[in-house]
Image (cartoon, rainbow, N blue to C red):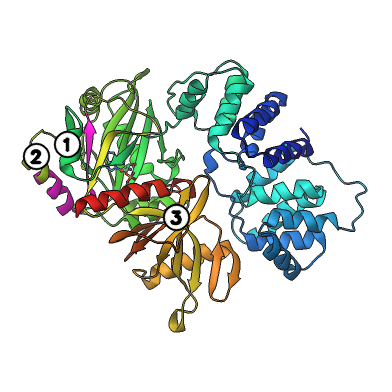
Amino acid sequence: MRYSTLVQFYQRLESTPKKLEKRDILAELYRQCSEEELPKVVLLSMGTVFPSGALELGIAGEMMKRVIARVSGTTDTQITKKYKETGDLGLTAEQFLKNRKQSTLGKRELSVEKVFENLRKLPEIGGAGSQEKKILLIAELLSSAEAAEAKYIVRTILSEMRIGVAAGIVRDAIAAAFGKDVKEVERVFDFVGDYGQIAVLAKNGRLKGEIQIGKPVRVMLADRAPDLKEAMEEFEQSLLEWKYDGFRVQVHKSGNEIKIFSRRMEDVTRQFPDIANFSKECIKAKECIVEGEALAIDKSGKPRPFQELSRRIQRKYDIERTVKEIPVQVNLFDLIYLNGESWMDKPLRERWQQLAKTVKETKNFRLADRLETKNYAEAKKFYKHALKMGQEGIIVKNLEARYQPGRRVGYWLKVKDILEPLDLVVVGAEWGEGKRARWLGSLILAAKKGGKFVEAGRMASGLTEEQMDQLTKQLKPLITGEEGKTVSLEPRIVVEVGYEEIQRSPKYESGYALRFPRLLRIRDAADKGPEDVNTVADMDKLFKMQKRRR
Ligand code: AMP
């Protein structure tokens, strides 16, 4: 498919705010695609080239400006000036490329495949000279692009499509294009996690929501409860489990083959050969999928801070050494597949009984600490013990509930002592003063509302020099503009923030600000990305909850 054809669809999508119209435009587009084109077109229509946006392209505004300047024969300064007017580097590229005085003779027509292929290569490029290699890949596209095509290529790379296409519309469009039921498409998403692949299955009449060993299942999530008492009253039969502060892993075992997936369905098998070995040794079943929380532990088995585990997740080389340096322990809490059969529709009680039968426990691969009780005093003791052992709190689970992939359905309720920390994305920052002038300090944080990020306060304290150093390194390439000491940033980095109270504030678009915010951790991209941050609706809920507490 020509990229210009896709661009015509982008333009139609951008010109209407109506969701139903958008759905029909997308359905028309998807129907036009061959089987090979379809998965690529579906992802590109969502403004990405990776399912669930899993891998970031790692290209920031500054680099983009340089490429546009180079291809259009202007200067960075002119680009920056135009960008200040338009607030959109896509539009900026379009305007400059329109005026390009280059001969178009012999110019190749861009295909969807070519754009897809070049963008896919971007995150793989690392090491010396990687910047230049990335610039060349983008420049190659922009030099063959018509002005309108350039606009959308730039927007795709920067993850700012501005065509109002969210996952829900894509789901509905796939259903409409191939005459399927929306519910069915959504269910398959729980297992496949990629609308590109799902569209192909729908086109071929092979849409089946089935768990498959080796393919990640979207994980079930927990809701928050105001306190232990309310959480316990919620269910007829409840199980209390420690809520470990670690990294969620979904382990797939098929014979001697092990795959490990993160909460965001990323394959992290390579980073955790030790977990793969524990699984081979301790899971007494031919085929099985179990879930648990991985913690970094010290020699005596005590949990180490999350930051240490984070090093394990990020480490791509020298893995054997980090395995020795930072041993992990997996605390298992669910079983969702066993020997050719899905266990997701069975009640938690049965899943737990089977989990206990299937796993031979060791110090590093063990069942999560749990207690079945209706007695509040006993529950409270269990909860306090979890806190004393350095964990976050507990999760109260409905023993009669099925496993609900990808959803917070109120069957799991987390109870924590401190007010729920928030995951927020960093959208701006301020350069420090004096000794701290080389660091970005005071962070401007945002929550999600609809499809965009809205500011929800600032955080200046609680950052150690080491954290400021790390953050500055991560944030600097994301700068999109500077005004005085304040920089605006592409929303990529997520931080977990603790605070004393959520306050109403007209100063920020969310309507809220945080009192005494402090940095708890910088999130790892495999764990939580910008699409996983808390919403303003979450803040509304917490705001009401804290009022009830007083
Ligand atoms: P949150 O990230 O605050 O929504 O809490 C849910 C996360 O807690 C899950 O994704 C797991 O990574 C983690 N977790 C820790 N212990 C448990 C447990 N016993 N059961 C379920 N999730 C747990």
Residue 75, above or below 261: below
Residue 69 occupies quadrant? bottom right
What's drawn in magenta, residue-wise?
381-398
Tell me the SS state at disc 3. Answer: loop
> Residue at the spot x=53%, y=33% of the render?
168
Disc 1 designates what residue?
Answer: 232
Q: Earlier in the sequence, mark 1 or mark 2?
A: 1
Percent x, y of residue 257: 41, 30
Disc 2 designates what residue?
Answer: 376
Q: Which mark is residue 192?
A: none
Q: Which mark is residue 510?
A: 3
Q: Is residue 390 magenta?
A: yes
Amino acid at dot 3: Ser
Asked whether 313 or 155 is in front, the reply is 155
Percent x, y of residue 262: 41, 41
Percent x, y of residue 465: 39, 73
Looking at the image, can residue 534 be seen? no
- Asked if marks 1 and 2 touch (Cβ < 8 Å), the reply is yes
Amino acid at dot 1: Met
